[in-house]
Amino acid sequence: MFRGKGKPLCRKVRGMLSEYIDSRLDGENKSLVERHLEICEACSKELESLRMTVQLLHRVAEVPAPRSFTVTVPEPRRESAFGPASMRWLRPATAIVAIALVVLLMGDFLHGFENNVRSNSGPGNITLSAGQLAPSSAAEQQTWVAVPGVMGQMSLATAKAVGYTDYTIVRSSAVSQPAASPIPSVLGNEGPTGAQVIVRGEGGVGWPLRQTEIGLGAAVFVLLGLMIYARRQRRKKVGAR
Amino acid sequence: MDEQDLISRSKSGDVEAFNLLVEQYQRMVYNLALRMLGNAEAAEDASQDTFISAYKAIGKFRGGSFKSWVLRIAANSCHDKLRVARRYRVVSLDTLLLEPDELHQANNNESPEDYALRRELGRFLNEGLTHLSEDQRLVVILSDVQGLSYEEVAQATGSSLGTVKSRLNRGRTRLRDFLLQREELLPSKFRLNK
């Protein structure tokens, strides 16, 4: 072959032969190549063999395409309720439900829905019958109760809202406001603030925490399934004819 | 209707206008894929992928040479096919580059002897192209087989003009060396050293 032979000028000229064949050299380089080719037989042979190679490549005939490569777009179909286009709300909805579930689980795990004060149980408890407490009154907000089996204390209103039926009134700041609720009068009869009164509350349903968690978990699974379905439907909208 | 109108209509979702562009360029794209891959079936796949990708991306076409833009998509499609073939060894490159018969369809005004010679030459050239790197092969095919200018090749390959010149020079030299090594096998009409 011709590679690797010659002087630096030969190497330089050979690097330009391809452009010379294509008439892409500027005037200065073109005259440099032509002057060198007049005196260098090896580079002249290199030029001829390259020129022949290019001519052979030009002889390669194009072949016709064996078939048409036109593209077709499927007719737009009426979207179902769970069609790809109607699923744009899925991602944010799934995210919101998942975040709500996580917050709920964390709160439940950390007892975030209860007041973190030590229970104060002891003798001298008083049992109140249902109906003796005004529902969700200001007095209930200011009355603290302990629930058996639950650490800490919570307001009476919270205990009723959660659905606890057995609780012990630990203290009430509503003592000085006898008009606000029947509780202060009861407490007033039994002793100073801090006396313990067992209240038999109304057996309300309250807030079904576990059921809410299970419901949210199921909703997350359903939404994730719909997202996977929607993603599969979105693929290959454009097909080959 | 001129090309710019067809491109504008294609951008607004007119698939019929786009298909007119496909009909205009499908032969060139298929030939590039066939020379790059050396396999008719793979070339068909690559060509179809090219036009589907082009249709999806037509909105991003910012003007310039549509031919170069389509050829660039075709080149990427060929690179993908070769990468997959290498990775999974589904078909070795040697097998891929066997000369398909359809590369040698006889012209109407070609004698049987000329046809045989051209077939032999095509086989040699195709084999020679396999000895080039993918980048060199792409540039040589675009420039010397398909007749694109240096500027068009640069656009189609996403390379600088200097890179195109360099790859073309090396590719031609390498192909020339390959042909010289097998010169006794070449038809005398096509021998480099006469």
Image: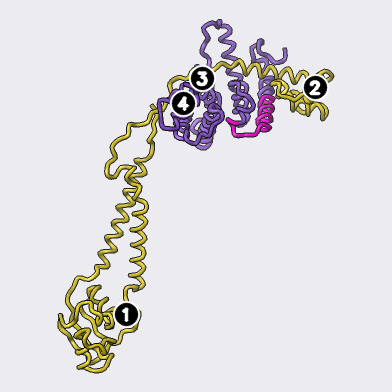
Q: Chain of mark 1?
A: A
Q: Chain of mark 2?
A: A
Q: What residue is disc 1 on?
A: A151
The amino acid pointed to by label 3 is Pro
Q: Tell me what residue is drawn at x 29 percent, y 45 percent.
A: A82
Q: Is residue B158 magenta?
A: yes
The tag earlier along the polypeptide, 2 or 1, is 2
Q: Chain of mark 3?
A: B
Q: From mark 4 to mark 1, how far is it between C-alphas?
A: 75 Å
Location of residue A117 by image quarter? bottom left
Q: Is residue A169 left or right of residue A100?
A: left
Q: From mark 3 to mark 4, how far is it between C-alphas?
A: 34 Å
Q: Tell me what residue is drawn at x 35 percent, y 47 percent.
A: A88
Location of residue A115 by image quarter? bottom left
Q: Which mark is residue A31?
A: 2
Tell me how many marks there are.
Answer: 4
Chain whose colour in the figure is purple: B
The tag earlier along the polypeptide, 3 or 4, is 4
Instruction: Give x and y (percent) for residue A163.
Output: 22, 73
Q: Tell me what residue is drawn at x 65 percent, y 30 percent.
A: B164
Q: Quadrant of the C terminus of chain B?
A: top right
Span shown in magenta: B155-174
Question: Which label lies toward us, 2 or 1?
Answer: 2
Marks 4,2: beta carbons within 8 A: no
Dominant secondary structure, magenta: helix
- On screen, residue A160 above or below A194: above
Chain whose colour in the figure is yellow: A
Dots 2 and 1 on the same chain: yes
